[in-house]
Amino acid sequence: MPLLNEISFPSDLRKLQKNQLPQVCDELRDFIIEAVALNPGHLGSSLGVVDLTVALHYVFNTPYDKIIWDVGHQAYPHKILTGRKERFYSNRKYGGISGFPKMSESEYDAFGTGHSSTSVSATLGMAVASALQGETDRQHIAVIGDGALTGGMSFEALNHAGVERSNILVIVNDNGIAIDKNVGGLSKYFTQITSSHTYNRLRNHIWNLLGGNSEYHQKSKNYVRRFFAAIKALLFRRSNLFESIGFRYFGPIDGHDVKSLVKTLSDLKDIDGPKVLHIITKKGKGLAQAENDPTLYHAPGMFDSETGEINTTSSSEQTPPRFQDVFGLTLVELAEKNPKIVGVTPAMPTGCSMTFLMERFPNRAFDVGIAEQHAVTFSAGLAVQGLVPFCNIYSSFMQRALDQVMHDVALQNLPVIFCLDRAGLVGEDGATHHGVFDLAQFRCIPNMIIASPLNEVDLRNLMFTAQYTKQPFVIRYPRGKGVTVDWKKNMQTVEIGKGVCLKQGEKTAIVSIGAIGQNALKAAEILENLGQKISVYDMRFLAPLDETLLHEIFKTHERVITLEDGVIEGGLGSAVMEFAVKHNYNIPIQRLGVPRCFVEQGTIEELQAECGFDVDSICKQIR
């Protein structure tokens, strides 16, 4: 008899017998596989935490007890068990539920987690608040996985939690991988703990000798207890990172044994203070292909739920490449000629195509883990010593390193090249991942060159130019396919701060920056067929701004429309308006772009229409 159909909320789950939980896990995995096969999303991570999710909601009194998921893309089973099963078909769709935990969506989503490494800080804050308000029975659990412990903020929070002595449980979901394979010393450390049978046997033996959680252990002061306590301190302070900073460490245990998880979590509820439970899981558990290739099946797109095969569309026609692949292949091309070029990425080598450089020059490509701040300052150090670092960070993730960009790079005027992937609206990932704030954020920082290519050829030329520029250089470009089939041309230098006229018209001029200029060109073509000629200009650089070109535009047109795929306030539109005021130009200026708000999920086309700068909206504004 199916069980998942009878579960709408965790209260329904808790009515079941413990021996029924494995069946719930099986059905939940099948549900996720079938749903994500037809409506693409994050697959592997959510499959890996099914058993843990069931155990957590079975043992703890959610939503009173707080569970914070980090990183948020592992929360699909949580969403399905907390009142959103019937709406899960709308996951990541326009007007549907978010692909990440979202406080305004459900009382069970204790904290919004779209970026990684935030859970321990938030959980500790909630635990301290609960204690101050007398809610001593409330449990606070952080589930941190997919490499999120490589983020420095996690260590800051752990360090604080160890001395705060608050009643929190940190569950380390150790699957050995983020999107790509985990890197760094911490990953090796977990491997050593996992494989150290001697350590775990000693730990458990001594703990039992000390009486475990018994009254004897808590109150006895005899010499035997003191002797063993001294041994414990000697062993553990040198052997376990967590215990050395004040946490009780438990594990590692099998993260796919739901009955064992229920027992362990039930026991841990009665232990006060900060605790770590280390579980071992397999990303993609339950789908063979996802288990064997977790990077590909992190977010595989549409696939066959029965066979696991990813759907591909074959075409004999040549299509434009992804901007990401153009970046990766061009970086290799440049590195072959310039031995000073190196690549840096914070845990996104596959997504940004840094893998091409890693394969060609493994000693000149660095995946630093989920650590954007470190990636920026590490790049600054490389630049100080004369290397040419191309630091590739997703636009929305770069928000986490603005201080390092300002203080460690721009203030010292170091020639770090920042390639901001996923700039502009990115679609179904929603508010936490749209790269719409970068232009406004960077424009106010001195010494920064800020550029955005119209197409793939422009991207190559900007990368070629940036390697010879002796100051910070930002190149932002969108996610996905470009527009140019014949993109692999000889690269040439771009004049810094120089824009271009793409189409000469009459009374109205559209001034754009970046790939969104393609919308302006399409709108101009439509309007020309209707008998209305408009001009289209690609500024290419936000800083320095091409004031010579702007003078020409304002002197020869009666109306100016600015177009950008970033927030209107502070970006290109603001720069053009400031220019007009400074030079006393008194003609209408209309700004098109993202309003000052957080845009939710949807297709690029849906979101551009909502923001009012899709092709149809541009045409309506001009007619």
Image: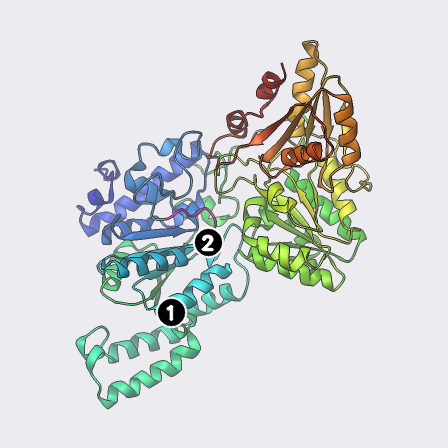
Q: Amino acid at mark 2?
A: Asp
Magenta-drawn stretch contains 114? yes
- Residue at image point 64% right, 60% down: 408
Q: Which residues are magenta?
A: 111-116
Camera-nearest residue between 293 and 187: 187
Can residue 306 be seen from the camera position used here?
no
- Residue at image point 46% right, 53% down: 146
Q: Which circle marks residue 309 in the picture?
A: none
- Residue at image point 63% right, 46% down: 442
Magenta-drawn stretch contains 278? no
Label 2, residues with CA under 10 Å away: few <14, some 14-19, many ≥20: many
User: What is the secondary structure assignment of the residue under circle 2?
Assistant: loop
| Residue 149, percent from left and from top | 46, 60
Residue 455 vs residue 595: left or right? right
Camera-nearest residue between 479 and 206: 479
Label 1, residues with CA under 10 Å away: few <14, some 14-19, many ≥20: some
The quarter of the picture where the C terminus appears is: top right
Camera-nearest residue between 390 and 570: 570
| Residue 500, percent from left and from top | 78, 31
Determine the main secondary structure of the stretch shown in magenta. Answer: loop
Residue 433 vs residue 451: left or right? left
Residue closest to the far top: 531
Q: Which residue is mark 1?
A: 162
Q: Amino acid at mark 1?
A: Gly
Camera-nearest residue between 363 and 605: 605
- Is residue 337 shown above or below 488? below
Asked whether the beta carbons under mark 2 and mark 1 sit within 8 Å of each other, the answer is: no
User: What is the secondary structure assignment of the residue under circle 1?
Assistant: helix
Q: Which residue is mark 2?
A: 146
